[in-house]
């Protein structure tokens, strides 16, 4: 790809020589350009939200300065551009909007031009040499931008293939999901009968409990698959917070975690598709129990008729890369997960006109906040 781009743009040995010659002129000013770059970047709230905090920005400044030094390194081969492509893939992982690749590359372009204009004479560059070097910079940055944008296309293609797989999965779920429920129901009822017959044998009780857990997990997967197949619009109705929380969290517990649920006020009514929102609450709380080290807190509340669900855990939390992909179909960090629960949850919340956010929480792990605005039924 690099050879094709270099040929089309006309980037060759003469450009490489000019950039190498400009290295001593440019390097002393790169730190200032990096500061200017992040000043522009962080002034945009959407771009600033991509980063977790000042510490991460400080680390990224070091990476950017190294990247800029590489522009004047004199070696521009396939290995060089593969390293640059990895940077583009990192931007994809953190979900930096693609349009900012163009605008922020232009900030660097103009900054490098300004460095050349201010320092060319003192460095012995004539007007022709300075303009030729600026052209070489433009060519290389155009190639760099094309390489990075190609990584967004790679991501788009992967998402398209994922959507195709999901469509097939939905058809499969619609055809066999209900059939699977029947034998699972038989297994579940049989374990209850066996438990009564076997009495208090701890070994048998342990095995029966494991069977029930796997039946519950299978039913949960089937529910997600059937919801994928249905893809229905929400049908809103009035429901109390107490009922919503009770039914949404039914069956959830953990022997190794403190599971605290607060509903305030329990009698408050919200207008939502109860079964869908209960599924959202169940999915997120279930994930929190899986991730938690010892504590999960769930808050269900209503503010000006807006439903708010807040789920905190004290697990390892979410890296910026995980947060960027968290609501993508088939993305999971668990070895036994299938990556549909949070994706389906987001679809449900989106259809209600609400929002769902994943952040760092006060317990040290993840915090999920769901907000669904009011809508009275017609």
Image (cartoon, rainbow, N blue to C red):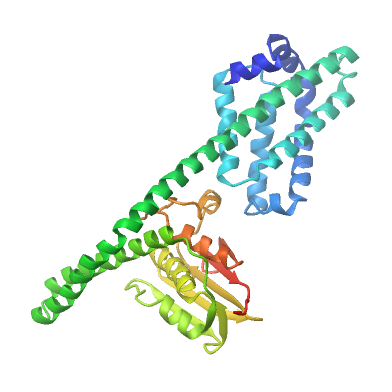
Q: Can residue 293 be seen in this view?
A: no
Quick one: 159 or 286, which is closer to the camera? 159
Q: Is residue 116 or residue 332 the one in the foreground?
A: 332
Answer left or right for 343 relative to 3.
left
Q: Where is residue 78 in the image (x, y as percent from the top left)?
A: 55, 19
Is residue 258 at all visible to an observer of this figure? yes
Quadrant containing the N terminus in the rendered view = top right
Location of residue 360 with respect to 277 vertically, above or below: above
Among all residues in the image, which is located at the extreme top? 14
* Residue at image point 83% right, 27% down: 113
* Side of 114 relative to 210 (left or right): right
Depicted 302 relative to depicted 165: above or below: below
**Residue 246: percent from the left, percent from the top?**
42, 82
Give the residue drawn at x 51%, y 37%: 157
Q: Position of residue 132 (x, y in %)?
A: 82, 15
Provide residue 46's location: percent of width, then percent of height: 70, 52
Residue in view at x 76 percent, y 23 percent: 138
- Examine the image and state in which quarter residue 87 appears: top right
- Find residue 140 and report its image quarter: top right
Q: Which residue lies furthest to the bottom in this view?
A: 267
Q: Can you tell which quarter of the image residue 91 is in?
A: top right
Q: Which residue is more in the foreground, 342 or 364?
A: 342
Quadrant where the C terminus sits is bottom right
């Amino acid at each position: 790809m690099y050879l094709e781009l270099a040929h089309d743009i006309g980037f060759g040995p003469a450009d490489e020589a000019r950039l190498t010659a400009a290295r001593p002129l440019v390097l002393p000013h790169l730190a200032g350009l990096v500061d200017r770059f992040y000043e522009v970047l962080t002034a945009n709230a959407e771009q600033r939200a991509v980063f977790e905090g000042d510490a991460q920005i400080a680390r990224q400044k070091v990476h950017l300065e190294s990247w800029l030094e590489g522009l004047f390194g004199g070696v521009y081969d396939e290995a060089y551009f593969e390293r640059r492509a990895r940077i583009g893939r990192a931007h994809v992982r953190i979900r930096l909007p693609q349009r900012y690749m163009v605008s922020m590359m232009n900030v660097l372009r103009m900054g490098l031009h300004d460095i050349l204009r201010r320092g060319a004479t003192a460095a012995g560059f004539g007007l022709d040499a300075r303009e030729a070097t600026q052209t070489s910079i433009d060519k290389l940055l155009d190639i760099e931008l094309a390489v990075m944008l190609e990584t967004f296309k790679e991501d788009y293609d992967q998402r398209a293939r994922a959507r195709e797989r999901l469509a097939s999965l939905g058809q499969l779920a619609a055809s066999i999901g209900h059939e699977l429920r029947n034998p699972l129901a038989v297994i579940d009822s049989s374990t209850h009968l066996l438990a009564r017959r076997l009495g208090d044998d701890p070994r048998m009780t342990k095995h029966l409990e494991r069977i029930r857990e796997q039946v519950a997990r299978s039913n949960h997967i089937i529910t997600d698959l059937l919801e994928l197949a249905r893809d229905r619009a929400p049908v809103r109705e009035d429901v109390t917070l107490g009922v919503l929380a009770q039914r949404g969290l039914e069956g959830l517990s953990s022997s190794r975690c403190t599971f605290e649920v607060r509903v305030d006020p329990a009698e408050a009514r919200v207008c939502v598709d109860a079964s869908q929102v209960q599924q959202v609450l169940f999915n997120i709380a279930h994930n929190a129990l899986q991730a938690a080290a010892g504590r999960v807190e769930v808050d269900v509340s209503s503010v000006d008729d807006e439903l708010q669900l807040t789920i905190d855990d004290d697990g390892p939390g979410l890296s910026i890369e995980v947060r960027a992909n968290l609501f993508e179909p088939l993305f999971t960090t668990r070895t036994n997960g299938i990556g549909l629960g949070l994706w389906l949850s987001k679809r449900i919340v989106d259809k209600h006109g609400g929002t769902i956010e994943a952040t760092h929480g006060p317990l040290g792990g993840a915090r999920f906040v769901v907000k669904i605005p009011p809508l009275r039924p017609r």
